[in-house]
C-alpha cells in the first residue's frame, strides 16, 4: 500500500518512516513550516532523510499557525526542565502547556490526508511515542483512533493513520532505529534552531536519555 509520511526530521518520525518503508510504499514525505524556531533544521533533516531513502520530499508552509499561538516553539523562552523531572507529571504538564500549538497534529494529518487521497495512498505514517502521549493527547492511540474515524468520512478513498512508534518509549525507538539503520546524524529533535541541538529543551533531554539508555542496554 502506498503511504504519505509526516516527517518532522525528529527521532520518532524518522524511525516510524524507516519501519514504514518495510511495510508500505512511501511516495511522499511532508515537513511543515509554521514559523517554529527549528523550522530550517527540521526541513533540512526531512530533506536529507528523504533523499537517503529515495522518497519525494515536500515542505508545506502554514504561516497562519504562528500568528494564532503563543507557543514557546515560535516565540518566547523554550522551557528547560530538569533532567530528573522528565517523568514527573506536574513538570511534564507545565512544559507541554508552554510548547502546545493549537491543533497542530490535527492540521498536519488533514493536510497529509489530502495529499494521500490525491496520490492514491491509503496510509499516513506518523511518529508518535508512548512517553509524550502522557501529556500530549494528540500523540495517543485514542487520538489516532478518533482521527481515523473522521478520515473515513472526509476522504472518498480510504485513508488512515498508522504510527509504528506509538507504543514505544524513546529508548525502544532508538533501538528500533539502530536495527533499521536510521542515519541518526541527520535527525533533528531540538526545539531550537541553532547550529547544534541545545541539549537542554525537553525534546533534546528525552532523546539524549534514550540514546544513553540504549547504549547501556546494548
Image (cartoon, rainbow, N blue to C red):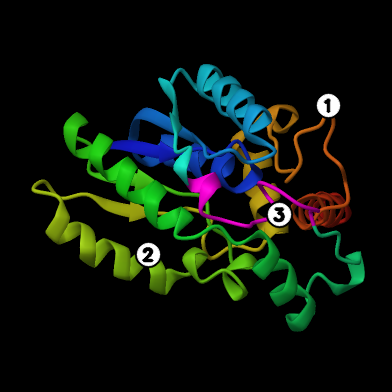
Q: Tag 1: Cα neighbours inside 10 Å, few (<14), some, or many (≥20)?
A: few
Tell me the crowding category of disc 2: few under 14, some 14 to 19, or many 20 or more residues within 10 angstroms, Cα based: many
Q: Which sits in the foreground, 168 or 91? A: 91
How far apart are the two marked residues, 2 and 3, measured between alpha carbons?
25 Å
Q: Looking at the picture, does residue 147 appear above or below residue 107?
A: below
Towards the viewer: 45 or 93:
93
The residue carrying mark 1 is 195
Considering only vertical position in the picture, is 134 above or below 204? below
Percent of width and height locating residue 10: 64, 41
The prevailing secondary structure element of the residues shown in magenta is loop
Structural distance between the alpha carbons of marks 1 and 3 = 19 Å
Write down the residue under mark 2.
Answer: 144
Q: What stretch is highlighted in magenta?
A: 65-78
Q: Report helix, strand or loop for mark 1.
A: loop
Question: Residue 72, which numbered label?
Answer: 3
Relative image position of residue 20 (x, y in whole percent): 43, 41
Asked whether 36 or 66 is in front, the reply is 66
**Residue at 51% across, 71% down:** 137
Residue 69 sits in quarter: bottom right
Calculate the distance from the C-alpha at mark 1 to the C-alpha at mark 2: 34 Å
Badge 3 marks a residue whose secondary structure is loop
Please name the residue shown 57% across and 42% down the image.
15
Q: In this view, does 69 lie to the left or right of 59?
A: right
The spot of residue 27 in percent (x, y) is: 33, 27
Asked if the magenta segment contains residue 156, the reply would be no
Sequence-wise first label, 2 or 3: 3
Q: Nearer the viewer, mark 1 or mark 3?
A: 3
Amino acid at each position: 500500500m502506498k503511504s504519505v509520511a509526516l516527517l518532522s526530521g525528529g527521532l520518532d518520525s524518522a524511525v516510524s518512516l524507516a519501519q514504514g518503508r518495510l511495510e508500505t510504499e512511501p511516495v511522499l514525505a511532508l515537513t511543515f513550516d509554521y514559523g517554529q524556531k527549528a523550522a530550517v533544521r527540521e526541513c533540512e533533516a526531512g530533506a536529507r532523510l528523504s533523499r537517503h531513502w529515495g522518497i519525494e520530499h515536500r515542505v508545506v508552509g502554514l504561516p497562519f499557525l504562528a500568528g494564532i499561538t503563543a507557543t514557546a516553539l515560535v516565540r518566547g523562552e523554550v522551557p528547560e526542565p530538569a533532567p530528573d523531572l522528565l517523568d514527573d507529571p506536574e513538570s511534564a504538564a507545565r512544559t507541554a502547556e508552554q510548547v502546545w500549538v493549537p491543533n497542530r497534529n490535527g492540521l498536519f494529518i488533514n493536510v497529509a490526508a489530502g495529499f494521500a487521497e490525491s496520490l492514491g495512498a491509503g496510509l499516513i505514517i506518523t511518529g508518535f511515542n508512548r512517553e509524550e502521549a502522557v501529556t500530549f493527547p494528540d500523540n495517543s492511540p485514542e487520538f489516532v483512533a478518533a482521527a481515523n474515524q473522521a478520515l473515513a468520512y472526509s476522504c472518498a478513498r480510504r485513508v488512515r493513520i498508522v504510527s509504528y512508534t506509538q507504543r514505544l518509549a524513546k529508548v525502544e525507538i532508538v533501538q528500533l532505529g539502530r536495527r533499521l539503520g536510521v542515519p541518526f546524524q541527520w535527525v533533528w529533535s531540538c526545539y531550537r534552531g541553532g547550529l547544534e541541538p541545545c541539549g537542554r529543551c525537553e525534546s533534546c533531554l528525552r532523546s539524549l536519555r534514550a540514546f544513553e539508555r540504549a547504549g547501556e542496554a546494548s
